[in-house]
Amino acid sequence: MGDTTETFYSVIRGQGVSRRSFHKLCCLTAASFGLSPLTANSIAHALETKPRVPVIWLHGLECTCCSESFIRSAHPLIKDALLSMISLDYDDTIMTAAGHQAEAILNETRTKYKGKYVLAIEGNPPLKEGGMFCIDGGRPFVEKLRSMAEEAMAIIAWGTCASWGCVQAAKPNPTGATPIDKVITNKPIIKVPGCPPIAEVMSGLVTFMITFGKLPELDRQGRPVMFYSERIHDKCYRRSHFDAGQFVEEWDDTYARKGYCLYKMGCKGPTTYNACSAIRWNGGVSFSIQSGHGCLGCSEDGFWDRGSFYDRLTTIKQFGIEENADQIGMAAAGVVGLGVAAHAALTAVKKLTDKSDRSSDKIRPT
C-alpha cells in the first residue's frame, strides 16, 4: 500500500489544481514573507511531504471579530487555508457538530495528535468566581483552556482579547478577564494582537507555520516580527505631512480635506506596532487612516484604559519643516555668527598675546 498521509499538495491536487499553479502559489508565498525566490522550492517540498496540521480553535470572552476577519482572507483564500492547509478539527463557531458530539471530537483530537496540534484561542478566560462568567461545554472556559493546552504543540492568541485582555480586562474588570499568557505559562504562545487582526496576518501566520514546521521569529512581547516589527507611522502615506508639520486641526476642516496628518486628532500610529499601513484591510483596499480616521492603537496593550481615542496622548516631537524651517535657519545662522565672532575674538587674543611675547623678548636682558 502507498503512503496515505494527507498533505496540502495531495488535497489541492485532488481539487484539480495543476502542478504549475502549485509552484506559482509557492513563489507568491515566498514573496509575501519577504524571502528569496529560491525558498519557493523549500516551500513546495514542505507542502508536498508534511501532513496537514491539526488545529483546535477555542472561544472565550470575545465578540468573534477575529473569526470574522480570518474568513475574509484573500491571500491565501480562507477556503484554501481551512480545507487544504490545515485540518480544523474543532471550532464551535463554524463546525457542524454540537454538544456531546463536538466534545467527543475535541477529546479525540487531543488524544490522537498529542503534542502535534496547534491550539488557537480567540478571547480570554475570566478567573473570578471560579471562572463562572464563561461556561463552555458545561465547565468554566479556563478549565477547558488549561486541559487543551497541556498537549498542544503551540498556542496562538488571536486578537487583543487573547493577547492583552482588551475591553473585557479594562478597568474595573469585574470578571477578572485575563490574557492567555497569564494562565498558560509553560507553552510557546504567539500573540497576534489587533481588534481584530488583519485577515492576511492571521492566514499568513498559519501558512508560515505549516510551510516551515516551526514558530516564526517573535519579538520580546511574543508577536511575529514579520508583521509587528514596524509602527503604522513608519509606512503611513501621511507621514510626509507629519514631517512637514501639517496637521488636521478639526474634523472636516480644510487640512482634513487635503489629507494632512491626523496626529493632533488622537492618531496612535506613531506608537502602534502593526501592519495596517503596509498590508491594509479588505484585500489591501484601505485602512483607518486612509479612510480619514486616526489609528486607535487597538493592537497595543491596555489601549482601552488610555483615555479617549481622540486625546493626543503621546509626546512625539516632529521636525515640522514648513513651520520651523525659517526659525531653524535663523538659529543656525545665529550659531554660525556666534562661531565666527568667537573665532575672530580668539584670533585677536592670540595675535595680541603673540605681539606681547615678542615685545617681552626684545627687552629681556641677555
Image (cartoon, rainbow, N blue to C red):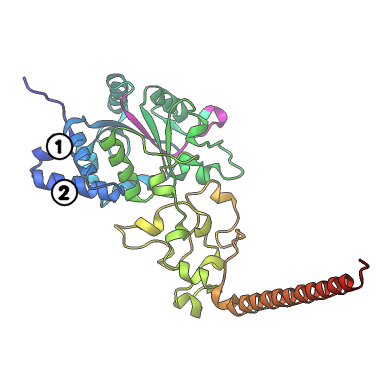
Whether residue 10 is visible here, answered yes or no, is yes
Q: Amino acid at mark 2?
A: Lys
Which residue is identified by label 2? 24
- Looking at the rendered image, the quarter that the N terminus falls into is top left
In the rendered structure, which disc, 2 or 1, sits on the residue that comes first in sequence? 1
Q: Secondary structure at mark 1?
A: helix
Question: Farthest front residue?
Answer: 366
* Vertical relation: 278 (above or below) 157: below
Q: Secondary structure at mark 2?
A: helix
How many other residues sit within 10 Å of disc 2, few (<14), some (14-19) or many (≥20)?
A: few
Q: Which residues are magenta?
A: 116-130
Residue 16 position, x and y percent, is: 7, 43
How many other residues sit within 10 Å of disc 1, few (<14), some (14-19) or many (≥20)?
A: many
Q: Amino acid at mark 1?
A: Tyr
Q: Answer yes or no: do the residues labelled 2 and 1 have beta carbons within 8 Å? A: no
What's the CA distance linking mark 2 and mark 1?
13 Å
Whether residue 125 is visible here, answered yes or no, is no
Residue 179 position, x and y percent, is: 50, 37
Q: Residue at x 81, y 72 (%)?
A: 354
Q: Is residue 123 left or right of residue 45?
A: right
In this view, the residue in front, 192 or 72, is 192
Which residue is identified by label 1? 9
Q: Is residue 120 magenta?
A: yes
Instruction: Please tell me the numbered disc located at residue 158.
Output: none
Q: Residue at x 49, y 80 (%)?
A: 254
In this view, the residue in front, 110 or 276, is 276
Mark 2 or mark 1, which is nearer to you?
2
Question: Farthest right residue?
Answer: 365
Residue 106 position, x and y percent, is: 31, 26
